[in-house]
Image (tube, grey):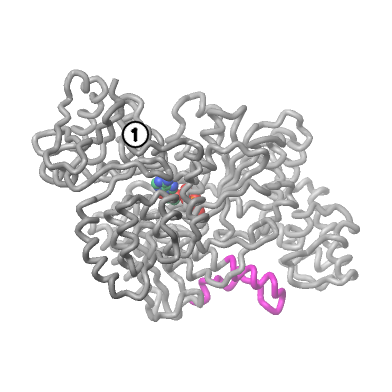
C-alpha cells in the first residue's frame, strides 16, 4: 500500500495556487493511496540528476514532483508546478540523507556547481576563509557532506553564505550559519536537536527511513481525510511541523514543573498548545490551558480546536482565562463576590491615608499591598517588618513600616467588614480553597505568557494541580512583560531547575523587523524569574524582508491621515483587512485611528475581548495585541509623552527603582507591539518622537 508524505515547502506553495488547481491537486492526491496500485502514473524524468524524482499529472498544465523510494512505499510530494518548471525543478535537484540528523534534505546541485568555481577563484587571493576555525571532522560530525564541505571551504565572506541559502541543503546551511555566527560546534550540535538519532545508525541510502524521521519537514498523511485536513489549513504549518527543539519540549517527560522560554515569535504558544495536546493524549487526566488576557485565551481556544483530533482530546482540555478559573472556584464556595472597583479602591486608600495622617500616597500604599503584602502572603506586622521589598525603591525605616502596615491592616479590615473583594483577593481565596482540596480539578496545567502572571495567579495554578511529573508547564519571555508583576518562581513554589528549554528561531517576523525591535531593548537588564538575567541575544529569523519604516509628523492629524493612506496602500497591494493591525498606546487614540481609517473607507474594528474581525483592519492597544500577529502592522503615536506614557511611570523623585521598572515595562510594551509584525512594520509619531526610538542614522 502506497503512503503519501507532504513536504512543508509544498504547503506554502499550495496556499498560493489558484483554487481550481488546489482542488485538482487535492483530488489527485486523495486517490493516491488506492490509485497507485491501479496506476497513478509516476513518470520518470529524463536527464534527472536524481532518478528517484518522478512527476505526476495534475491536469493538462500542472505536474506534481514526487520523491519515490527505491524500496518501501512512502512517496513524498515536493512540488506542484507548471509542466516545464516542474521538470526543470526536478532535473536540478537531488535528495539525500543528512548524516547527523538522519533526515531528508533536498539541494539545488546545479546552483552549487555553478557558483563553486567563482567562489574558489575569489578565495585564492583572500587572506582567510570563513570556516578556517572549524576542522573537517567537526563539520562532518555536524552532518556537512562532501559537496557542502568543498563549498564551505571556499567561502570567505558571510554574504556568500547568505546567498547560498537558496540552494544548499537547509540543515547544513543552518550549521554553517551557526558556526559563522560564532557558536561552537557543541552549541550548534545542541541546536540541531541531532540527539534524536543518537545511537541509531543512519543509512544514507534509506530515503524512506529519512522521510519518516523528518517530522519537522515532512508530514506523513494517514489517509485521504488527513490529507484534506492538511490542505484545508496550509498556512497553519505549526499544526504539523515542529522544530526538533520544539518537539523535544512537547514530548518530554518532566519530573516536575518545566518551562520554555525564547524571544518573540519563536513558537512558545505553538509548543504550549502541542504540549497540552500531547498531555491530553498521553497524560493522565484533565488538562488546563490558561493565560491572562482575553484575546490570547480566545486565540489559544482557536488553536486548540485546530489541534484536537478527537472528541476525547477536546473533552480533556479546558482553555480558560486564569481569572475565570479563580472566579469560578470562588463562586462555587461563596457565590458571586462583591467587587471593589478601581475607583472605589482609590477612594478607600485615600480616606485611610487621611484618617491615619501617614506620609504615603494612596498609589504607593496600593502598590505596597500588591507587590509586598499579597506577593509574599504577609499576614502580620511581624511578617511585614521582615518582608523583602525587592523592586520597591523607597527604603522604609521600622517606624515607617509600622505606619504602612497600619494603613494596609485598615484596608484589609475594611474589605472584610464590608464583604468586599478585589480581583487579587478573589485569587488568594480561590488558591486557598484549591490548596485544601485533595481532589484537584486538573492533572496538568499549561500556561502561556506566564511572565505576566501575578504571584496570586501562580499560587492559584500551583494549587489547581497535584505536585508530580508533568504537573505545570509554562511558556514565558520576560522581555515581553507588560504588567507590573515580577515574580520569583521559588517564592510561588515552582522549581524548574534543570527543566528549562530555550527556543531561538523566530518563525513570525523578518530578520529586519526582529533586529530593529531588539534594538529597542538594547542594554536593558531583564530578569529570568529565577534569580538570574535572561537574554534573547541568540534569537534569529531566517525570513528576509523590507526594513521597518519610521515617519514623523508635525501634528497628530497629519500622522493619522498618513496612517490611513499607508493602510489603504497595503489593502490595494492585496493584503487582506484581517492581516493588517494598528497598535497604539491608549484606547482613546485607538478610537481616533478607527475614525481616520473609516474616513478613508478602510473597514476597521477596535480589538475588544475576542479575536480580530475577519473583514476589517484590527486597531487596538499594545496590551491587547499580545499574542496576536499581523502581516502588516502600523504602530502609531510613538511620540514623546505617549511612549513612555507619562501617567504610567512613577516619578523618579518618588521612587527611583519603581521609575526604572516602569520605564523598562514601557519599552517592553513597544517591543511587544513591534514584534507582532510578520512582513511590514511601519512606525509613526507626531510632534516629537518617543525617546525609545533609535535616532535616525
Ligand atoms: N515549527 C514551526 N513551523 C512553522 N511555523 C511555526 C513553527 N513554530 C511557530 N510557528 C509560527 O510562528 C509564529 C509565532 O509562533 P508563536 O505565536 O507560538 O510564538 P511565541 O513565541 O508564542 O510568540 P510571542 O512570544 O511573540 O507571542 C506563528 O505564526 C506560528 O504559527
Q: Looking at the picture, how far across and down is residue 350, in whole percent?
A: 76, 65
Q: Is residue 395 above or below residue 337?
A: below
Q: Looking at the picture, how far across and down is residue 29, in whole percent?
A: 23, 29
Dot 1 crowding, Cα within 10 Å, few <14, some 14–19, many 20+ = some
Q: Is residue 523 above or below residue 207?
A: below
Residue at disc 1, secondary structure = loop
Q: Looking at the picture, how far across and down is residue 193, in whole percent?
A: 48, 46
- Examine the structure image and report whether residue 330 is included in the region drawn in magenta: no
Camera-nearest residue between 172 and 131: 131
384 sits to left or right of 122: right
Which residues fall within the magenta stretch? 640-665
The picture quadrant where one finds residue 83 is top left
Residue beneath the point at 43% across and 68% down: 516
Camera-nearest residue between 657 and 477: 477
- Evaluate whether residue 195 shows in this view: yes
Residue beneath the point at 83% across and 62% down: 407
The picture quadrant where one finds residue 5 is top left
Residue beneath the point at 15% across and 27% down: 41
Does ligand 1 reach within 8 Å of label 1's beta carbon? no
Residue beneath the point at 89% across and 69% down: 398
249 sits to left or right of 652: left
Q: Looking at the picture, how far across and down is residue 451, in whole percent?
A: 61, 54
Camera-nearest residue between 579 and 104: 104
Q: Is residue 509 above or below residue 64?
A: below
- Examine the structure image and report whether residue 649 is included in the region drawn in magenta: yes
Q: Residue furthest left?
A: 60
Quadrant location, the C terminus? bottom left
13 sits to left or right of 446: left
- Evaluate whether residue 331 shows in this view: no
Residue receiving disc 1: 206
Quadrant location, the N terminus? top left
Amino acid at each position: 500500500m502506497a503512503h503519501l508524505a507532504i513536504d512543508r515547502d509544498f504547503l506554502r506553495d499550495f496556499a498560493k495556487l489558484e483554487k481550481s488547481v488546489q482542488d485538482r491537486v487535492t483530488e489527485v492526491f486523495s486517490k493516491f493511496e488506492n490509485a497507485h496500485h491501479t496506476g497513478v502514473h509516476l513518470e520518470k524524468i529524463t536527464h534527472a540528476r536524481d532518478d528517484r524524482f518522478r512527476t505526476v499529472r495534475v491536469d493538462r498544465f500542472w505536474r506534481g514532483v514526487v520523491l519515490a523510494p527505491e524500496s518501501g512505499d512512502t512517496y513524498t510530494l515536493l512540488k506542484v508546478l507548471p509542466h516545464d518548471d516542474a521538470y526543470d525543478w526536478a532535473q536540478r535537484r537531488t535528495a539525500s540523507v543528512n548524516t547527523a540528523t538522519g533526515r531528508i534534505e533536498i539541494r539545488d546541485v546545479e546552483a552549487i556547481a555553478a557558483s563553486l568555481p567563482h567562489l574558489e577563484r575569489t578565495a585564492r587571493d583572500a587572506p582567510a576563509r570563513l570556516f578556517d576555525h572549524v576542522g573537517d571532522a567537526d563539520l562532518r560530525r555536524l552532518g556537512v557532506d562532501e559537496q557542502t564541505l568543498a563549498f564551505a571551504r571556499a567561502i570567505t565572506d558571510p554574504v556568500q553564505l547568505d546567498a547560498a541559502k537558496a540552494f544548499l541543503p537547509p540543515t547544513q546551511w543552518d550549521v554553517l550559519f551557526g558556526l559563522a555566527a560564532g557558536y561552537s560546534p557543541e552549541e550548534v550540535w545542541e541546536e540541531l536537536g541531532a540527539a534524536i538519532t543518537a545511537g541509531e545508525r543512519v543509512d544514507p541510502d534509506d530515503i524512506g527511513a529519512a522521510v519518516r524521521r523528518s517530522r519537522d519537514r515532512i508530514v506523513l498523511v494517514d489517509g485521504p481525510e488527513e490529507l484534506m485536513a492538511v490542505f484545508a489549513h496550509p498556512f497553519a504549518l505549526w499544526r504539523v511541523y515542529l522544530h526538533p527543539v520544539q518537539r523535544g519540549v512537547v514530548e518530554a517527560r518532566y519530573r516536575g514543573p518545566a518551562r520554555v522560554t525564547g524571544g518573540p515569535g519563536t513558537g512558545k504558544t505553538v509548543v504550549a498548545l502541542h504540549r497540552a495536546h500531547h498531555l491530553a493524549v498521553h497524560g493522565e487526566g484533565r488538562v488546563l490551558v490558561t493565560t491572562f488576557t482575553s484575546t490570547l485565551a480566545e486565540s489559544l481556544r482557536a488553536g486548540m480546536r485546530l489541534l484536537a483530533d478527537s472528541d476525547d482530546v477536546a473533552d480533556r482540555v479546558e482553555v480558560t482565562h486564569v481569572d475565570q478559573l479563580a472566579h469560578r472556584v470562588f463562586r462555587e464556595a461563596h457565590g458571586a463576590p462583591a467587587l471593589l472597583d478601581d475607583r472605589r479602591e482609590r477612594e478607600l486608600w485615600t480616606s485611610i491615608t487621611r484618617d491615619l495622617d501617614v506620609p504615603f500616597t494612596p498609589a504607593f500604599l496600593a502598590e505596597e499591598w500588591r507587590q509586598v503584602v499579597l506577593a509574599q502572603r504577609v499576614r502580620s506586622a511581624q511578617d511585614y517588618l521582615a518582608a523583602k521589598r525587592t523592586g520597591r525603591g523607597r527604603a522604609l525605616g521600622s517606624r515607617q513600616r509600622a505606619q504602612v502596615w497600619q494603613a494596609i491592616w485598615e484596608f484589609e479590615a475594611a474589605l472584610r467588614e464590608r464583604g468586599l473583594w478585589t480581583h487579587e483577593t478573589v485569587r488568594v481565596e480561590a488558591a486557598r480553597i484549591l490548596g485544601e482540596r485533595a481532589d484537584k480539578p486538573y492533572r496538568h496545567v499549561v500556561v502561556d505568557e506566564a511572565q505576566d502572571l501575578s504571584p496570586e495567579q501562580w499560587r492559584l495554578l500551583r494549587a489547581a494541580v497535584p505536585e508530580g511529573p508533568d504537573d505545570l508547564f509554562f511558556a514565558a519571555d520576560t522581555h515581553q512583560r507588560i504588567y507590573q508583576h515580577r515574580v520569583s518562581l521559588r517564592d510561588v513554589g515552582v522549581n524548574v531547575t534543570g527543566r528549562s528549554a530555550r527556543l531561538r528561531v523566530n518563525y513570525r517576523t523578518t530578520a529586519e523587523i526582529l533586529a530593529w525591535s531588539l534594538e529597542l531593548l538594547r542594554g536593558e537588564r531583564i530578569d529570568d524569574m529565577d534569580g538570574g538575567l535572561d537574554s534573547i541575544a541568540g534569537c534569529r529569523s531566517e525570513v528576509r524582508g523590507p526594513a521597518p519604516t519610521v515617519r514623523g509628523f508635525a501634528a497628530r492629524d497629519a500622522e493619522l491621515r498618513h496612517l490611513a493612506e499607508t493602510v489603504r496602500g497595503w489593502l490595494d497591494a492585496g493584503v487582506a483587512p484581517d492581516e493588517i493591525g494598528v497598535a497604539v498606546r491608549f484606547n482613546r487614540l485607538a478610537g481616533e485611528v478607527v475614525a481616520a481609517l473609516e474616513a478613508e473607507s478602510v473597514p476597521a474594528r477596535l480589538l475588544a475581548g475576542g479575536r480580530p474581525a475577519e473583514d476589517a483592519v484590527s486597531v487596538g492597544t499594545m496590551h491587547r495585541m499580545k499574542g496576536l500577529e499581523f502581516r502588516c502592522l502600523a504602530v502609531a503615536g510613538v511620540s514623546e509623552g505617549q511612549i513612555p506614557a507619562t501617567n504610567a511611570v512613577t516619578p523618579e523623585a518618588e521612587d527611583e527603582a519603581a521609575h526604572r521598572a516602569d520605564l523598562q515595562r514601557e519599552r517592553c510594551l513597544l517591543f511587544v507591539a513591534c514584534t507582532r509584525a510578520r512582513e511590514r512594520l511601519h512606525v509613526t509619531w507626531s510632534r516629537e518622537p518617543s525617546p525609545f526610538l533609535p535616532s535616525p542614522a
